Image (cartoon, rainbow, N blue to C red):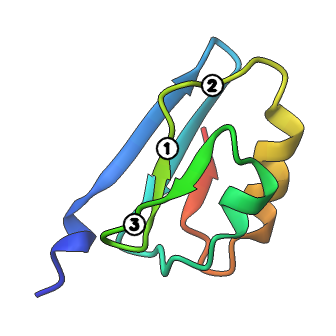
Amino acid sequence: MDVRKQFHVTENLGDEMRIELDLGKCAGHGVCALEAPEIFDIDDESGLAVLRTERPEGREAAVNTAVRGCPERAITIA
């Protein structure tokens, strides 16, 4: 059983945006980290996307681009 499927990460970006990252779907392509490096990174050990704790304001457009660019559809905005 792939334990990655058990993880579901949610981060609030102020009152405007909540990012949900489904690590069961993430394949580590890194599109999110390229499009919004202040929000996403790729974990060195697992090779999967992670949400950074430091989130600058005004990056909603970059996050939306990362969501649209994720080939596995592992990122959603709620």
Question: Outermost residue toward the top?
Answer: 15
Which residue: 71% across, 21% down? 56
- Disc 1 vs disc 3: Cβ atoms closer than 8 Å? no
Residue 32 x %, y %: 68, 60
- Residue 44 is marked as 3
Q: Quick check: 13 above or below 11?
A: above
Return the residue nearer the eye: 48 or 61.
48
Which residue: 79% across, 69% down? 69
- Disc 2 vs disc 3: Cβ atoms closer than 8 Å? no
Task: Tell me: 61 left or right of 49.
Answer: right
Return the residue nearer the eye: 19 or 51.
51
Residue 22 x %, y %: 42, 61
- What amino acid type is highlighted by mark number 3? Asp
Task: Tell me: 34 left or right of 25.
Answer: right
For disc 2, the marked residue is 55
* Residue 29: quarter of image: bottom right
